[in-house]
Image (cartoon, rainbow, N blue to C red):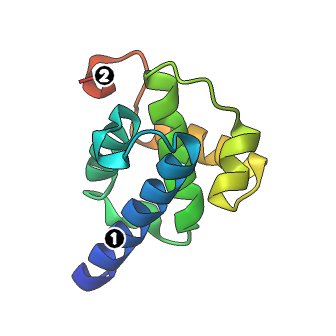
Amino acid sequence: MQKEGIKETEDFIKGKMWNICSNLRPQIRPEQDPVYKKSIHILDRIIKRPQFFSGRNREVIASSIVYISCIIYNKKVSQSKLSKIGGVSEMSVRNGYRRILGDFKLDERRQDIKRT
């Protein structure tokens, strides 16, 4: 993936995560939401490996990252609700979540992605 393609993908995913977080918790502005901030942190780790995005749906990646962040912060949100807001299937969120945790050897209990 070329550099401008990576930036475009990153911007799209950030925008989608902003939209998802705004809809999940409308009373909190996303830039003040720890779930959104953690989602950006996780995306920053993922973006360093652009081959991860090849052939993958950007909406699924955004929804899955927000789901991981919700788990980290103990925010009760179902994969069903997240999938509806994100415009993807429930199974896509579940598979995307597992793929991100597996590919990046992340564990929501590990220090490297714990709450900040």
How dense is the environment of label 1, judged by Cα within 10 Å: few (below 14), some, or many (20 and up)?
few
Residue 106 or residue 68, whichever sits in front = 68
Reply above or below: 5 against 10.
Answer: below
Q: Position of residue 41 (x, y in %)?
A: 27, 43
Q: Position of residue 90 (x, y in %)?
A: 76, 47
51 to the left or right of 37 = right
Q: Which residue is mark 2?
A: 115
Residue 107 or residue 31, whichever sits in front = 31
Q: Disc 1 versus disc 2: distance between alpha carbons?
A: 23 Å
For the view shown, which residue lies furthest in the front direction? 27
Q: Which residue is mark 1?
A: 11
Q: Residue at x 45, y 55 (%)?
A: 17
Q: Position of residue 103 (x, y in %)?
A: 45, 43
Q: Residue at x 40, y 30 (%)?
A: 106
Reply above or below: 76 against 42.
Answer: above
Q: Residue 108's quadrant in the figure?
A: top left
Reply above or below: 3 against 76.
Answer: below
Quick one: quadrant of the C terminus? top left
Q: Residue at x 43, y 22 (%)?
A: 73
